[in-house]
Image: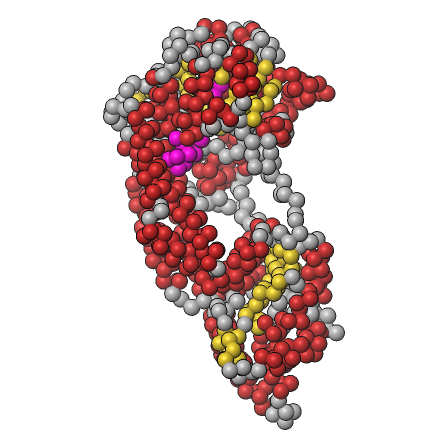
Amino acid sequence: MLDEAYRGKNVLVTGGTGFLGMALVEKMLRNLPLLNRLYLLIRPSREKGAKERFESDVLGSPVFSRLREELGSRFEEYIADKVRILEGDVHVDHLGLGAEALTELSREVDVIVHSAASVVFDAPLDAAVGSNVRGTLGLFGLAQGWEKKPLFVHVSTSYVAGTKEGLIPEEVPDEYSPSGVRLDPKAEVMYLEEVVREVEKASRTKELARRLQTEARRELGMVGEDAEVCERAEQLRRAWVREQLVERGNERARSLGWQDVYTFTKSLAERWMLQDRGDLPLVILRPAIIESSVTEPHPGWIQGSRMADPLIMAFAKGILRAFSGNPESLIDIVPVDHVVNAVVVATARGLVHRPCEPEVYQVASGEKNPLRFQDLYKHVREYFLKNPLRDAGGRPVLVPEWGFPGRRWVERRLKVELLGLKIAGSLATRMPEGHLTTDLRGRIARGEKRARISLYYSRIYGAYVNMQSTFSSARTMELFRSLPEEDRRAFPFDIAEVDWKTWLQETHLPAVTSKPGRKKRRRAPEEKVGEVAAIFDVDGTIVASNVVSHYAWLKLQELPMALRPLWVVTLIGRVPYYWLLDKLSRAHFNRAFYKNYKGWSPARARTLGMQSFYGYVLKRLHPEGIAALRKHKSAGHRIVLLSGTLDFLLEPFKDLADDVLTARLEEENGVYTGELSGAPVAGEARARMLASFARRTNVDLSRSYAYADSISDLPMLEAVGMPVAVNPDARLRAAARDRGWQIKQWRKNGA
């Protein structure tokens, strides 16, 4: 039996907290009882050490539910006996381990299964080289000096073949790249690392620094302080570096015949190991696209989002209305449990035979059980027509029908669409602030987002769904057939037995949409006082009032009784103008209306503001709003009043709030000029003011609450994690319903 090959053996596994690694660890512990020990090299996270990560992220995953059930009360004891956790990192010299741990590994380890890697197709060049090349070679170099000369099992990818056409054999690469260029992997890595240094140096030129400072200041507007501008400029610099490294890495990869920097760096690692292998036995496993399990540890087990899943979900959400795939291209998918079983069996063979020459196995489906892009599309569309996703308003999303145009046509159309949207967006920025402008900008932004996502997916995945190659799996199938019948049942990986339609519609797609078996969302850290804010608009939210009626009350206090009716008639005559101006732009309305305060004394205005609180505001208060405010206060939340109302009118509210962010009038010669000091606190400016406040005070907006009543408050509500529409106008009500937000009706007390 296959288990005999592992009798008394010790296996070191990297990548054990990843999708494939986790499934491999579970399978080995469940089906290889004669295995002596698993060493798991685990990198600590910011919040957890390696041991805690193993216990919560690995053992706490549903992947171990079957083994827990089988072992019952013996589970913890069994794991403690079989597994040793090493806190380290393949990216660090000597794996980040001390001399004692390294000596133990040197004496004890019989097999290394290296599955840790960066599988991001558009990773920055430095990250891809560091993880996929330097990390692999560091571990490989250490293993060459260990006493036991362990078998090195390297988990690569079938796509190291790049864009070659035809049948791709299971063999080591020659000295040429897929495009036919002679390639020295060591020299190539040196070249790539020099590119990284060049980009970093270019990011610190004075010209770029000035441009990024200007961009940062423009983003933050009038609410940005110098320290914030510098911090934002540095964020923009790092983003620029990342963008350049992604572009330069993929450009280099494609020029040499690879799809992207991921497949490029995985191939460089293979080639370098083969050059420097010495007498270390080497087995290379090249799986294709790994997706959810067929049967083990249970059908549909999946962790995270795999390669095909973003495309599937974007299609199901109606975002991908067309895609540039060749309908006849093979989509080479393999279930994760097939890959795990192939790794276990290939490793057992290597332990028994100690190969003198490198052995290569491709775990792929294209040769034995082909799935073409048009069939994948048909099965997926059929599923979502019967089981549609729902939008934020609970309505079923209608999936599009694809016509499979060519990649160039799709990308050209998307570029034209983005150009048109960019021009429209530029024109919209010159329009006056207001509800109509906000709506227009929102539609443009949503269209641009949809087009950018479609173009991104076409560029990232286009090469994979337009391939003219087939990965041979003859040696892998020969390996499977060499097993006795009992081991075939225990470690199945015959891809010909998978029915793609059944697996997709009954196993994989339900798993992807309902996410069973995925990691639970990380529990939010314990709240600290002041980290979470409750932001309240005032007029229309806490108080059933508006700036016009409040101003009218103030003005009437200053007028003789005989003049009041005439003044009221005059104000009523101007109301239609103010109403139209407010509908066009709340910011323009505020600027125009606050000119009524020109010539007012600030001291007298503050006195009237206090009087208005008792004579005007109290009977218009919403008791439920005050109750909500006090509830947040009791929960330790920071209470923020954010309003376009003038500061002297909100002074009586200061005892209720920790912070009051509001509009102020400029003063000259002891009186108000009628001009606002800074931007009106409305629309996008309100959201920018809130963002600036959050940065200064370390408030986490993603966990904060906001309450408001008007469509002009939409940017503020969108800035927080828990928005609430209070007594919303029709347009805010519709927006809240579409987004699935809470809607509350608060009434004034009338006292």
Q: Is residue 458 left or right of residue 113?
A: left
Q: Which span of residues is magenta-colored? A: 113-129
Q: Is residue 366 above or below residue 541?
A: above
Instruction: State the residue at coordinates (35%, 54%).
Output: 211
Q: Position of residue 177 (x, y in %)?
A: 28, 25
- Residue 88 on the magenta span: no
Quadrant holding the C terminus: bottom right
Q: Nearer the viewer, residue 517 or 702?
A: 702
Q: Looking at the rendering, which quadrant does residue 57 occupy?
A: top right
Q: Position of residue 71 (x, y in %)?
A: 68, 18
Instruction: State the residue at coordinates (32%, 34%).
Output: 194
Spot the residue most to the right. Answer: 751
Instruction: State the residue at coordinates (69%, 70%).
Output: 621
- Residue 118 on the magenta span: yes
Q: Is residue 657 left or right of residue 169?
A: right
Q: Nearer the viewer, residue 108 or 702?
A: 108
Q: Nearer the viewer, residue 170 or 155?
A: 155
Instruction: State the residue at coordinates (30%, 43%).
Output: 409
Quadrant holding the N terminus: top right
Q: Is residue 395 left or right of residue 144?
A: right
Q: Looking at the rendering, which quadrant does residue 406 occupy?
A: top left
Q: Position of residue 501 (x, y in %)?
A: 48, 28
Q: Is residue 703 above or below residue 69?
A: below
Kindly tell me whether residue 255 is visible in this rendering.
yes
The image shows a total of numbered marks equal to: 0
Q: Is residue 744 left or right of residue 199?
A: right
Kindly tell me whether residue 328 is visible in this rendering.
no
Spot the residue most to the left. Answer: 181
Q: Is residue 621 above or below residue 148?
A: below
